[in-house]
Image: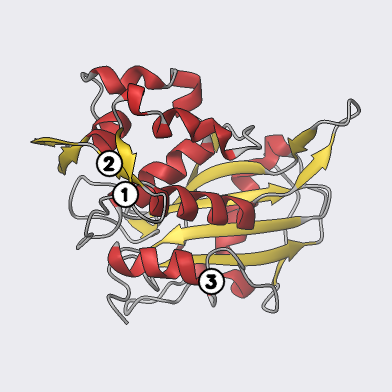
Amino acid sequence: MSFVNYTFYHLKNKEPVGLNSKIVQEHLLKSSMKKCVHINYYAFNQEFVQDDIKQFALDFFRDYNVAITLQTSSSGFVGQNVFKVLVEEIPCTITSMTFFDKLLDPNNNIVCSTTDKDGNHTIRQCMEVYKNGLYMNNNLKMMLFEGECSEYFLYEEDERAEFVFRLLQHFVIGGQWCQDDIVIEPYLNATKYVYKDLLTVEKSTSSKIQISSKIYKVTAFDSNDTVLFPKENIKSVPFSFAYIAVNQNTRTVVLLFHNVGDKIYT
């Protein structure tokens, strides 16, 4: 058990440039995620030990300076009600969006061979399938979520586990009243811009760029095992999500979360 008590401070003057960009905000509006997706920045003043992540996450959500920044829904958020935090480390090693180049190759059956006047790639449509609470009517969704289709195997399991892949999945799912885009670029742009907002990179000894942030999926519960954060979904679709990106060198942590239904079309 840890004996370290972590203390956090909200860096309120630091803004998520990518998330706030016009190109991303327009996509979030169409996806019914606008003003439901947030990125907050914090600093902490103790040395971070990776093996201590459960205590770190618990202290994070219980900290007053954090809790007051999470009161975005009508029910509010009370940090002292957090009894435990489920933490899952997410692999995060991808440093280039060329990771998604396979999606833009028409031979892989995700997009059509032609582009529109702006050079955007049209997503290939398919017969609608309903599974695990999702309606899937194009090959991008099938590749992301349908394990029995051939497109699913375009990426290996270790690639699918990467944080950037998960981000793409979240943006394709969207919010409760999501309108699917017919071209793939808005999804890739949202993924790229938000990914950059969250991560810190550095040069390794071999002068290669590597990611220094550690990514964790987090879910906060009360003593009755009720989800307090992010907002729990009634449906099986994972609309709501929360991740923290911890940089032990700068002693900063970035919180990305989507509380489905907080604000719609405002």
- What colour scheme does the image use? secondary structure
What amino acid does circle 3 point to? Asn
Number of other residues with Cα within 10 Å of mark 1, as a class: few under 14, some 14 to 19, many 20 or more = some
Q: Quadrant of the C terminus?
A: bottom left
Q: Please tell me which residue is depicted at 49% across the width and 72% down the height of the picture.
A: 22
Residue topped by disc 3: 20
* Residue 256: image tag: none
* Residue 183: image tag: 1
Mark closer to the observer (2, 3): 2
Query: Residue 154: horizontal and vertical position, in percent?
Result: 38, 20
Tell which circle, 3 or 1, labels the residue nearer the N-terminal end: 3
Q: Please tell me which residue is depicted at 52% across the width and 40% down the height of the picture.
A: 164
Separation of disc 2 and disc 1 at Cα? 5 Å
Regarding residue 93, the answer to whether it shows in the image is yes
Regarding residue 59, the answer to whether it shows in the image is no
Tell which circle, 2 or 3, labels the residue nearer the N-terminal end: 3
Q: Please tell me which residue is depicted at 57% across the width and 50% down the height of the picture.
A: 195
Determine whether, in the image, residue 240 is placed left or right of residue 167: left
Secondary structure under tag 2 reads strand
Residue 238 or residue 204, whichever sits in front: 204
Residue topped by disc 2: 123
Query: Residue 168: horizontal and vertical position, in percent?
Result: 42, 44
Secondary structure under tag 3 reads loop
The quarter of the displayed image where residue 258 is located: bottom left
Query: Residue 115: horizontal and vertical position, in percent?
Result: 34, 44
